[in-house]
Amino acid sequence: MSASSGPVFSSSSRSLAHRIKRWLCGDAPRPITVGVDLLLMQPGGANGGVKPLVFSFLGEIGRAQGRRLKFVFFASPELAPEIAPILRSHDELAHPTSIPPAIDVLYAVFGRSNLSRTGLPSINLIVDLLHKDLPAALPVEEVNYRHEWFSTIAAQATFFQCISHYTAERLQYHYHIPAERCFVTHIPVHQRLRPDHVVKAESSPVAKPFFFYPANFWPHKNHEVLLLAYRGYVALSKSAAWPLVFTGHPDERTVQLRLLVSQLGLNDRVHFLGHLSTPQFAALWSQAGALVYPSRHEGFGIPLLEAMAYRCPIIAARTTSIPEIAGDACLYVDPSDTASISSALQQVSADAQLRTALVRAGKIRLRTFSLARETAKLAAHFISAASAAPLRP
């Protein structure tokens, strides 16, 4: 199966098509109001790639659409400083205790939303089907909870925004969603890390070059297997071994992984840098020697494009959406095989020609992604979803 790449309009409704055309031409009587549910979003990096996805997409749509679309952000007061850069003069920030303003379409960025109601069109963002495809990575209670709300939104949502064709196919397979209700937007949000974001530090926090793995410490990210593989690589490369750098939101698993690092005798080689600001993160990318990305499950994989943008060779798992995104710009490994990962680390760190070839392939691959193209799809679906509902005065 493959997902629709554009909005689906009813061929039997000429008036609907006319209303959509008026909005696209800027001739609508009023803007479409999109309610953006950020109530589950936390300050910092706890939500992983959802935050850069949503903020980059809505910032780009806001610039492209002008006043044709109005955003009402439902969020906690603590999140206001992070929303401020994309909040335009005619947008609104609605706190949880405020009276909800009227909206035309709901954007459920965490898949589900307590703001959903009968008759309100919605676009529900789906980043993965982890609870179905790798349930062992989640507590049983979380698996059951996710299945319950997926079953609910399967019947309610107007459209599903999926971040890869792989994710769309898994959604359609597990919940029997018709393909015409799904559309795919890849998430090329690497441009948020612009060169002017790079802070000039007196020295790198880690000796260069180093292997870089930017990911929260969720079980499916596979840090334990990577550490075991890295120990094998160090044994092979000895003093020539590159350091290994982790970034991500600190949590209980961070403590467990630090303990494992100590048990493996890698304290002087593995570095936990926590959640970084955008300038700090950009600076680290500019210093990295290679991306290592052994995740067992990905809906997209933003770091793959970040690595391409920063001319970093990529080592990644041949699984889920990763081949769809990385293409041939990657040295693939089996994420369950420490020997496979160790060998790849050795190859990349020792072979300059291989690194050059991977970087060249990444540069070519990156050209196939366009933020403007992907955000235009989402904007068109906002208009399509709102147009299918009765107009507010």
Image: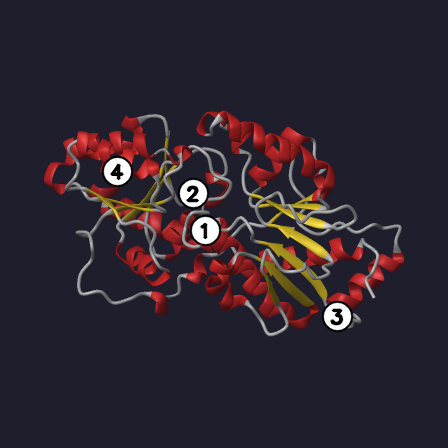
Can residue 188 be seen at all in this image of the molecule?
Answer: no
Q: Residue at x 33, y 25 (%)?
A: 337
Q: Residue at x 33, y 36 (%)?
A: 253
Does residue 182 appear to the left or right of 305 in the view shown? right
User: What number is the disc on residue 345?
Assistant: 4
Spatial CA span between label 1 and label 2:
8 Å
Contact between labelled residues 2 and 1, with CB atoms less than 8 Å apart: yes
Query: Pointer 2: what residue?
Result: 328
Query: Pointer 1: what residue?
Result: 365
Q: Residue at x 78, y 61 (%)?
A: 20
Dot 1: what SS?
A: helix
Residue 240, given in percent of the width and then of the height, sits at 13, 42
Spatial CA span between label 3 and label 2:
40 Å
Q: Amino acid at mark 3?
A: Cys
Dot 3: what SS?
A: loop
Spatial CA span between label 4 and label 3:
52 Å
Contact between labelled residues 4 and 1, with CB atoms less than 8 Å apart: no
Check disc 2: other Cα within 10 Å, few if <14, some if 14-19, many if 20+.
some
- The mark that comes first in sequence, 3 or 1, is 3
Q: Amino acid at mark 1?
A: Arg
